[in-house]
Image (cartoon, rainbow, N blue to C red):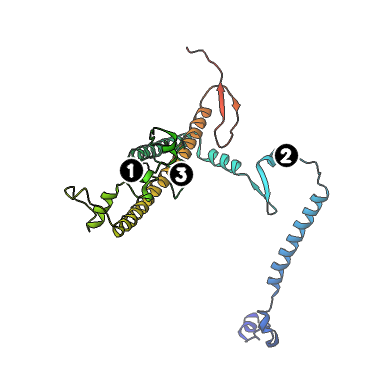
Amino acid sequence: MSSLRNAVKRITHKERSQPVARQHLGNLEKKKDYKVRAQEYHRKQDVLQNLRRKASARNPDEFYFGMHKSQVQEGVHRKLEEAEYKARLDEIGPDAVKLMKSQDLAYVRMQAQRDLKKMERMQTSLQYIGDNPITGVDDTNEEVGLKKRKHTIFLSDREQALNFNVSEHFDTVPELAGRSFNRIRKDTLLKMGNNEDGYYDNDDDQDHVPSEKELKKQQLLAKKQARIVSKARSQAYSELEARTKRLKALKNAESHLVTEKIVASKGRKRKVVGAVDGKPAIYKFRRKRAR
């Protein structure tokens, strides 16, 4: 009889779908969906209840040493950079750390040596004269190595010193009188202005008296040359100043790496002076008799 019952076609029971009026709410939730949602809801409620219970029983004077290595950022406890750094060091091992430190020290020393040689070449080519009119680099800067140069002129009496005219004394235009270098004379400027290529001939007449138009041309040429020289000096001094700051930072990084290498070595030591103004700390080792 059971086989005949199975042979008879039965009614197909279909799941009820979401009514047309509620199609905008999505598919109709089935019991299995409800069970998942209900279990997740009760799990969250249990977690919240457990947290409330712990908060009510919390001791306000509670302390543990992990507090020294963490801080609260936007309501979330996070480890400090030092703690994370130590954790990474523990992962890679002390031998790998020592190797990387030695490579860093060698690279920093190489870069510092390159910058030092470049600065020496620049200092030999630059003329250390007066203050830079654009960047305001002071010639008394000991780190850059600039030295102020002076041109001393001796006169016979005080009256000549009070009435002294620099441009007349050096036979140049007033625009170039304030220089202590490359003070071009008026006749040289005139010859340079007359030639299109900017060069002059030494065989020209030395007794030529320049006219008013030629004097104006001399002044314009002197201003143009002063601008070009000033711009070139400004760029050179700016580069020298930037390289000086970079060399100082590299030397500071080198001293930190050397200090870390010394601290990691064997032997009892104690800190004499802590790190101040970005400089590394100073340690004193205990004396040990050599065998």
Instruction: Look at 28% across and 51% down and name the residue there.
Output: 189
Q: Earlier in the sequence, mark 1 or mark 2?
A: 2
Tell me the amino acid under the disc marked 2: Tyr
- Please, is residue 18 above or below residue 154 in the view? below
Task: Give whichever of 41, 152 is nearer the camera.
Answer: 152
Mark 3: few, some, or many residues within 10 Å (few <14, many ≥20)?
some
| Spot occupied by residue 207 in the image (x, y as percentages of width and height) | 22, 49
Task: Give whichever of 165, 104 is nearer the camera.
Answer: 165
* Cα distance in 3D space between marks 3 and 2: 54 Å
| Figure label count | 3
Tell me the amino acid under the disc marked 3: Val
Give the residue furthest to the right: 56
Instruction: Look at 60% across and 31% down and name the residue there.
Output: 274
Residue receiving disc 1: 170
Mark in the foreground, 3 or 1 = 1
| Spot occupied by residue 79 in the image (x, y as percentages of width and height) | 63, 45
| Spot occupied by residue 234 in the image (x, y as percentages of width and height) | 40, 49
Task: Give whichever of 35, 146 is nearer the camera.
Answer: 146
Residue receiving disc 3: 137
Q: Secondary structure at mark 2?
A: loop
| Spot occupied by residue 69 in the image (x, y as percentages of width and height) | 65, 41
Q: Secondary structure at mark 3?
A: loop
Q: Are marks 3 and 1 in contact (CB under 8 Å)?
A: no
Residue receiving disc 2: 64
Q: Are marks 3 and 2 in contact (CB under 8 Å)?
A: no
Q: Secondary structure at mark 1?
A: helix
Mark 1: few, some, or many residues within 10 Å (few <14, many ≥20)?
some
Mark 2: few, some, or many residues within 10 Å (few <14, many ≥20)?
few
